[in-house]
Image: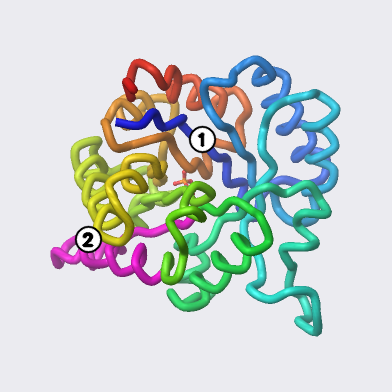
């Protein structure tokens, strides 16, 4: 099996202000300079990208700057939107697409998610594609079908070569911000099935090398158990990423990669 480097992302959502975003970035960067075993990214709100970027760069921390969303077209007459060019200008290296809050609160379709993903890859960015079922879908036995559909439609026309820049985040909607976490066994089951979809869409190598991370009420208290599952390659962290100490504990729980994913 290929060795997948764990990835832990902090999705700050519509939280922080200029001062607290800076303090959070400093708190994380101070500790993470020497931790190459885990890829770490933070996803601050758009207005704070530049200041967080300069804090991360000035500390020499190998933390990736991410954006929570992006528009699917190049610069032009799209009032209020933010392009890949602008994000790259601010130091952004990867973007979230298809987060459940965008799918379910803002109304983004699988087609829009796919176009955002394609535009980001075309412009050289990495992408975290978020998928996951609602409570109603879980209770009516649709979990695997929903994940499969969102993965297939989200990745439409994405080549195997481009998949090296794609991470999939399985985030059951009922677990996001609710304090309810999927059990490690349920999360592992969903991840394994998503990996099987990748094998069918591409091949065994893409399936084995693509990182699939879990999101939904991950905390330092449950991270190690989730990350110990063979198909869980890290996490996308919301609430718990707003506290540097708590986030750093979660990052530590994702290392070392070697023990979990022997080459
Ligand atoms: P949560 O959010 O950790 O607050 O549940 C996760 C996410 O939405 O990415």
Q: Position of residue 106 (x, y in %)?
A: 54, 74
In the figure, 61 relative to 195: above or below? above
In the figure, 88 relative to 247: above or below? below
Numbered disc 2: secondary structure: helix
Q: Earlier in the sequence, mark 1 or mark 2?
A: 1
Q: Which mark is residue 8?
A: 1
212 inside magenta stretch: no
Q: Looking at mark 2, is its residue's CB closer than 8 Å to ligand 1?
A: no
Q: Position of residue 250 (x, y in %)?
A: 48, 26
Give the tally of numbered discs: 2
Which quarter of the rendered picture does the C terminus lie within?
A: top left
Is residue 107 in sight in this rendering? no
Instruction: From the viewer's perspective, tell me whether residue 36 is left or right of residue 58.
Output: left
Q: What's the residue at 62%, 62% (across, down)?
A: 120
In the figure, 11 relative to 223: above or below? below
Q: Position of residue 105 (x, y in %)?
A: 50, 71
Q: Nearer the viewer, residue 107 or 206?
A: 206
Q: Position of residue 109 (x, y in %)?
A: 46, 77
Residue that sits furthest to the bottom in the current view: 77
Q: What's the residue at 69%, 19% (across, down)?
A: 33
Residue that sits furthest to the left in the current view: 141
Q: Main secondary structure of the magenta part?
A: helix
Cα distance in 3D space between marks 1 and 2: 24 Å
Numbered disc 1: secondary structure: strand
Is residue 197 in sight in this rendering? yes
In the figure, 173 relative to 220: above or below? below
Find the magenta span and give its range.
Answer: 129-153
Q: Which mark is residue 143?
A: 2
Assess disc 1: are there few (<14), some (14-19) or many (≥20) residues with their C-alpha within 10 Å of its C-alpha: many
């Amino acid at each position: 099996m290929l060795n997948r480097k764990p990835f832990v992302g902090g999705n700050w959502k519509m939280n922080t202000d200029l001062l607290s975003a800076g303090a959070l970035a400093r708190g994380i960067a101070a500790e993470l300079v020497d931790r190459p075993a885990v890829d770490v990214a933070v996803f601050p709100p758009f207005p704070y990208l530049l200041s967080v970027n300069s804090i991360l760069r000035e500390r020499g921390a190998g933390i990736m700057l991410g954006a929570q969303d992006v528009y699917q077209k190049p610069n032009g007459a799209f009032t209020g939107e933010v392009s890949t060019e602008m994000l790259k200008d601010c130091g952004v290296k990867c973007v979230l697409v298809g987060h459940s809050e965008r799918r379910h609160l803002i109304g983004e379709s699988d087609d829009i998610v796919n176009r955002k993903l394609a535009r980001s890859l075309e412009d050289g960015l990495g992408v975290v594609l978020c998928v996951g079922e609602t409570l109603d879908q879980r209770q009516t036995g649709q979990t695997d079908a929903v994940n499969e559909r969102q993965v297939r439609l989200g990745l439409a026309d994405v080549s195997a070569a481009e998949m090296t820049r794609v991470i999939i985040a399985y985030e059951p909607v009922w677990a996001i911000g609710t304090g309810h976490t999927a059990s490690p066994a349920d999360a592992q089951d969903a991840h394994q099935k998503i990996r099987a979809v990748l094998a069918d869409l591409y091949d065994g190598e893409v399936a084995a090398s693509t990182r699939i991370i879990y999101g939904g009420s991950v905390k330092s208290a449950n991270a190690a158990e989730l990350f110990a599952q063979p198909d869980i390659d890290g996490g996308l962290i919301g609430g718990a990423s707003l506290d540097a100490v708590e986030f750093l504990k979660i990052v530590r729980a994702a290392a070392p990669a070697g023990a979990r994913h022997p080459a």
